[in-house]
């Protein structure tokens, strides 16, 4: 009885696999060429890569990968303890992680640049195969690549008979007995369960891969690669995101293209969208849409806030509005939140706000009056850079002593150098705007 799902015991695997799979070593050459092309444009050792080899067998791919790639992390998984033992022997001088687990039970999230599965998934039932591919998808980082080879099914019964006969002939010419090659053919749809090329590509697309392609076909073996997207589309715009392992969620990075309605999804790939890597990239002057059930964001009068209302992310009100009051409950105003909102003339930053981050009000060149709260603790780098007109008046809710305790970063001269109206009450709001006193 074999100690793995292949036709051979672990100790026999390396000696026998080349008598069964034509051009076996060329499969590894092709896989490594794809990796070089995808990540380094053919240049070796360009960037460090985290790699998962699932169904790793005796570790042949990992040995080759260490010879050709700059590896930051290598994890080898296989459901056979004996196969893993052989792999550990081959890689004893390498800093690898070995796990006795199959693809159907992988439990990683956004961890690897590359996942390879060489001649392993065709042992699964349809349901198990779908689970294995989804697990690989989840384990890949956004923009990562999944590369695998399998025995694939021909499209017709005649095609199946021809390819099995070709494999038998190859085996006999490689030194196997006729009994051995016939026994191997008998494993088709009894011990391994191939699907055809079209079904493979459709499964990859349904799983969520942006790109799915075939790169290899020889006798019965086919090779596929698929790239996990790192953006979603809104109209003709692409919204790029990245996964934060510490926060265990996606953060939006930037927009490529234009949209008049930025939709922020609750989740991507089943993982929560929790924030922004850089809000400056999203000060687009348009509207935001989030669901009513979103756990992390809400939109009030077309201004984007954290769900609990303590953080103001991005202001995109209509340009006809000359006045704005930060709602009560806000504590933090995020970077670039109001950047270049040139239509604003009067701004009230309500009591309770403690931190205003870099460039939050930069280039708001037409502001004439602003109220700053007594609760303010930090005004970051260039928060008020190129801010206000010559008519600018600064009203502050606290005392001169409190003002001196505010941590002002560099580049806030437009506010600091003004005559400050101390102990000012929060402005009254009337039909025609704010009344500053």
Image (spheres, rainbow, N blue to C red):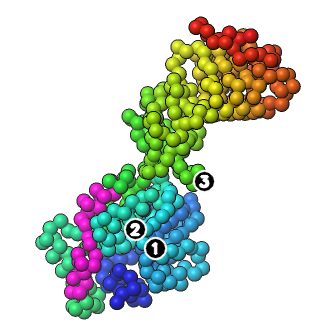
Q: Secondary structure at mark 2?
A: helix
Q: Residues within 10 Å of mark 3 (few under 14, many from 20)?
A: few
Checking the image for residue 246, the label placed there is: 3
Asked if residue 197 is among those painted magenta in the image, a careful observer would answer yes
Residue 416 image position (x, y, % from top left): 79, 22
Q: Give above or below for 163 relative to 355.
A: below
Which one is nearer the viewer's eye here, 22 or 420? Answer: 420
Secondary structure of residue under mark 1: loop
Left or right placement of residue 405 versus residue 214 in this view: right
* Residue 101, numbered circle: 1
Q: Earlier in the sequence, mark 3 or mark 1?
A: 1
Q: Position of residue 363 (x, y in %)?
A: 64, 23
Q: Label 3: state its secondary structure.
A: loop
In the rendered image, is residue 44 in sight?
no
Task: Say which residue label 2 marks.
Answer: 104
Circle 2 residues within 10 Å: few <14, some 14–19, many ≥20:
many
| Residues drawn in magenta | 182-205
């Amino acid at each position: 009885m074999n100690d793995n799902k292949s036709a051979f015991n672990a100790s026999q695997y390396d000696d026998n696999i080349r008598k069964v799979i034509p051009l076996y070593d060329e499969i590894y050459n092709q896989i490594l060429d794809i990796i070089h092309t995808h990540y380094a444009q053919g240049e070796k050792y360009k960037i460090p890569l985290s790699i998962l080899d699932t169904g790793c067998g005796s570790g042949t791919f990992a040995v080759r990968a260490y010879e050709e790639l700059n590896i930051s992390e290598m994890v080898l998984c296989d459901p056979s303890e004996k196969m893993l033992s052989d792999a550990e022997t081959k890689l004893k001088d390498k800093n690898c992680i070995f796990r006795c687990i199959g693809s159907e039970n992988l439990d990683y999230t956004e961890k690897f640049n590359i996942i390879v599965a060489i001649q392993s998934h065709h042992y699964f039932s349809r349901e198990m195969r779908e689970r294995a591919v989804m697990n690989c998808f989840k384990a890949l980082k956004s923009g990562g690549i999944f590369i695998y080879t399998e025995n694939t099914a021909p499209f017709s019964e005649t095609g199946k008979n021809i390819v099995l006969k070709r494999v038998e002939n190859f085996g006999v010419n490689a030194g196997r007995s006729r009994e051995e090659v016939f026994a191997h053919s008998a494993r088709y749809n009894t011990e391994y369960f191939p699907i055809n090329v079209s079904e493979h590509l459709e499964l990859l697309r349904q799983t969520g891969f942006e790109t799915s392609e075939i790169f290899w076909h020889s006798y019965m073996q086919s090779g596929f690669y698929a790239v996990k997207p790192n953006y979603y589309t809104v109209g003709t715009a692409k919204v790029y995101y990245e996964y934060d392992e510490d926060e265990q969620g996606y953060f939006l990075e930037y927009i490529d293209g234009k949209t008049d309605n930025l939709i922020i999804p609750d989740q991507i790939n089943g993982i929560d969208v929790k924030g922004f890597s850089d809000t400056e990239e999203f000060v687009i002057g348009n509207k935001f849409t989030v669901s009513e059930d979103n756990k992390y964001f809400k939109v009030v009068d077309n201004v984007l806030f954290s769900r609990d209302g303590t953080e103001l992310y991005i202001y995109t009100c209509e340009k006809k509005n000359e006045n704005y009051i930060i709602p009560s409950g806000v504590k933090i105003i995020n970077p670039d939140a109001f950047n270049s909102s040139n239509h604003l003339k009067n701004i009230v930053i309500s009591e309770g706000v403690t931190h205003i981050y870099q460039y939050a009000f930069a280039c708001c060149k037409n502001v004439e009056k602003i109220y700053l709260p007594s609760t303010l603790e930090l005004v970051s780098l260039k928060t008020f850079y190129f801010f206000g007109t010559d008519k600018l008046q600064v009203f502050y809710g606290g005392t001169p002593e409190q003002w001196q305790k505010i941590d002002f970063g560099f580049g806030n001269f437009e506010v600091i150098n003004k005559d400050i109206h101390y102990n000012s009450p929060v402005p009254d709001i009337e039909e025609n705007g704010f009344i500053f006193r």
